[in-house]
Amino acid sequence: MREMPIGLEHEFSFPIPQSKIVAALYPESPEFAAMPPVLATGFLVGLLEWTCVRALMPYLDWPREQTVGTHIDVSHSAATPPGLNVTCRARLTGVAGRRLTFEVSADDGHDVISTGTHERAVIDAARFTERVGRKGGPG
């Protein structure tokens, strides 16, 4: 892991397809199926995480080093229908060893749809996968 500069910024835009609406988040959920066709908060969180990951790529020995989300505290303050582009922004505000803190935001070209903070941790992918494997489960 190379030194990551405080203030590092990254912007990422993604066109919202029908496959990222609330009903698609958990197709098994009849409650979600009945909701309006707008970007699901869970998919919004994924876009914010993806933006942070992309910001860090030049500083990691990828794929040996990766990052995982450890905390998210964001709003989802406006609805976004499919067909709009969501632009996410991330700014690195803190580095404490392998713990990274970001300010994040997103807009859909009409409204600011999200603001908040996100924390990630740098991991050694092989060690992480081994530790998770010890928990058991299928496969």
Image (spheres, rainbow, N blue to C red):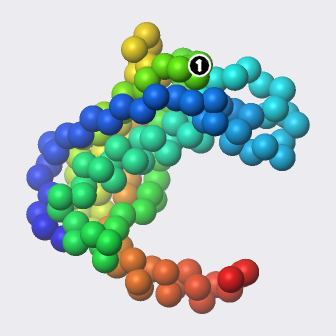
Foreground pick, 16 / 60: 16
Where the N terminus falls, by quadrant?
bottom left
Residue identified by numbered label 1? 81
Q: Residue 96 vs residue 22: left or right?
A: left
Q: Is residue 56 above or below residue 43?
A: below
Q: Give amino acid for label 1.
A: Pro
Residue at 34% across / 68% down in the picture? 66
**Residue 42, percent from left and from top:** 59, 41
Quadrant of residue 47 within the rendered picture: top left
Q: Residue furthest right?
A: 30
Residue 118 versus residue 15: which sits nearer the camera? 15
Left or right, residue 44 beside residue 8: right
Q: Is residue 121 above or below residue 39?
A: below
Q: Is label 1 in a helix, a strand or a loop?
A: loop
User: Would you say residue 70 is visible in this rendering?
Assistant: yes
Residue for point 22% across, 72% down: 61
Q: Let me know if residue 73 appears in the view.
A: no
